[in-house]
Image: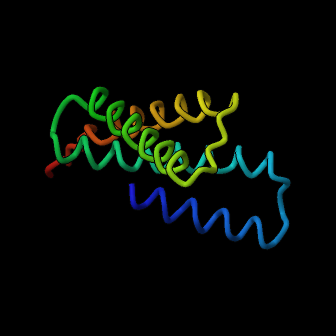
Amino acid sequence: MLTGVILMCIAAAFMMTAGLLPPDALNWALTAVTAVSCAAGGFVAARLNKGAGLVVGAITGAAIMLFITAAAIIRGDADISVLLPIKAAASVTGGIAGGILGLRERNKIKL
């Protein structure tokens, strides 16, 4: 989750100060960053759990999305719009992908 926060802060600060993207495009870019951070979280969680990558990844993605949404509501700048379910789906899907990838084991061929 910390990775996601750091990536979102860096991406948002760079894109907003440089004026590279309009606000709507920035929302979509941050949705992609959220999905990638959920994939990283799902990967780590599946590695630590050593099983059930699909379930662990989905729970990780949902938990990260709940934390992000709760933080936005507490700050008072929550943007409850059509993008919220899309962000939720992207974070859960990213978590699932990371959880599945975290369980893949590469068997080394011994010569």
Residue at 69% x, 49% y is 29
Q: Compared with residue 97, is residue 20 higher up or lower down, i.e. above or below?
A: below
Image quarter hosting the N terminus: bottom left
Most foreground residue, 56 or 5: 5
**Residue drawn 15% across and 39% down?**
50
Residue 24 in the image: above or below residue 95: below
Left or right: 40, with 26 as reference point: left
Q: How is the image coloured?
A: rainbow
Q: Position of residue 91 (x, y in %)?
A: 49, 37
Q: Position of residue 37 (x, y in %)?
A: 46, 50
- On the picture, is 27 further left or further right than 7? right
The residue depicted at 75 percent of the width and 65 percent of the height is 15
Quarter of the image where one finds residue 7: bottom right
Q: Position of residue 90 (x, y in %)?
A: 54, 34
- Give coordinates of residue 103: x percent, y percent: 25, 38
- Count of marks overlaid on the render: 0
Q: Residue at x 66, y 41 (%)?
A: 79
Figure quadrant of residue 84: top right
